[in-house]
Amino acid sequence: MTGLGGGVVIVPALCLLFNVDVHYALGASLVSVIATSSGAAAAFVREGYSNIRIGMFLEVATTLGALLGAYLTAKVAGNWIGIIFGVVLLYSAWSSLHKMHDAPPAGPPDPLALRLNLKGSYPVGEGRQSYVAAHVPQAFAIMFGAGTLSGLLGIGSGAVKVLAMDGAMKLPFKVSTTTSNFMIGVTAAASAGIYLARGYILPSLTWPVVLGVLAGSLLGARALTRTRVKTIRLAFVVVIVALGIEMIYNGVTGRL
Amino acid sequence: MAEEAEHGLEQAMGRILQIGVTASALVVSIGGILYLAQTRGARPSYQHFQSATAQLTTVHGIVAQALSLNPAGIVEFGILLLIATPICRVLFGVVGFAMLRDRLYTAISAIVLVILLFSFITSR
């Protein structure tokens, strides 16, 4: 709901607080990301906010990226993963404060979007508002990057996915966030096979993390309806920025 | 008519995701409780990377371990169910779009499915 997934907190928490090796932390986080995104996506897709065509089309890019990212985790040293992670955290914090536009784009729609049927409508009040995607090639390229980061860092990289759909395709805010969520599970599943084969997913560490995250997301969804989203978002951003700086610091000093 | 069928596909995808997550949470909880009941002694160290037990890195091995009621195997089987959930969702997409006679999106969903299966096959 705040537009930021749980993965961005799990990896730094495990690495920095519990001294867990980065690779185990990535494995536990990736599995939790699948759990929360699939749980939330189930509700969004039935309410008709997520666009399954746009999601499916862009998943070609994110899953290919995820394979590359998961392949790279074994090649990249732990402290570099820490540094890249920190930078992504800082970007996520910045993007969640950034104001999203909700106005339909000016100018003619992308002909490629029409040919690929990348359009739809979503519920607004009584009726439905329709939209067509813009800048399809750019969005596809950004999604490949989002998939790579997801596979490399064991996160959903929702912030980058929203950048592709909100920033490039100019989709309505609600459609961007819910379709991003819809895609996260599939993106993570693409790297999960490689993580599993490499032994990054440790049962004894993963089960408490997954169950904790699922319970937390249920509680959070309830609390959110009663709390001001703006306050939570601000608090979350402060935490993310602190974690991001700490991950970069630990990466640079070689303590990860 | 087309609108209705499309809505049906959305409902089916939502349902499969919900069932997958619930089933996996149940299996992981059972495995977790058994794990706590059977594991005694010092907290294992996760400080240095050392790959998970060889039996738990393949689908075949995990199923075998879960069937022998090994707690770690049960947990890992639950995790496998969770990973399979979005893959099933893509499979639903292939079938669903084919039923809607949307050739383009049947093909796109099939490509995504192939990439997902590829990650499991080549990584072994």
Image: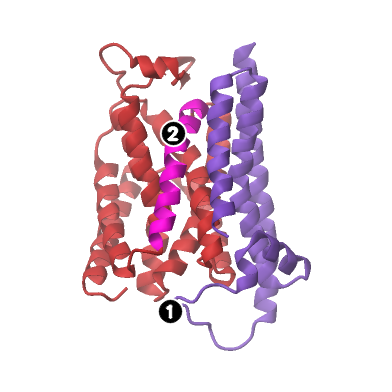
Chain colours: A red, B purple
Nearer the observer, A10 or A168: A168
Q: Which residue is drawn at 50% across and 26% down?
A: A53
Q: Residue at x 67, y 21 (%)?
A: B99
Nearer the observer, A9 or A21: A21
Which chain is mark 1 on? B
Crowding at mark 1 (Cα within 10 Å: few <14, some 14-19, many 20+): few
Which quarter shows the C terminus of chain A? bottom left
The stretch drawn in magenta includes residue A68 = yes
Residue A157 spot, x, y in % from top left: 38, 47
Query: From which residue to which does the magenta span run?
Result: A51-73
Q: Is mark 1 on a helix, strand or loop?
A: loop
The residue indicated by pointer 2 is: A58
Which quarter shows the N terminus of chain A? top left
Nearer the observer, A256 or B116: B116
Q: Residue A236 carries which label?
A: none
| Amino acid at pointer 2 | Leu
Image quadrant where residue B113 sits: top right
Could you tell me what secondary structure mostly forms the magenta stretch?
A: helix
Residue A242 spot, x, y in % from top left: 25, 62
| Amino acid at pointer 1 | His
Report whether residue B24 is seen.
yes
The stretch drawn in magenta includes residue A183 = no
Which chain is mark 2 on? A
Q: In this view, does B31 lie above or below A182?
A: below
Q: In this view, does A96 lie above or below A240?
A: above
Q: Residue at x 64, y 23 (%)?
A: B98
Left of B92 or right of it: where is A192? left
Image quadrant where residue A249 sits: bottom left
Report whether residue A3 is seen.
no
Residue A111 spot, x, y in % from top left: 36, 14
Q: Which mark is residue B48?
A: 1
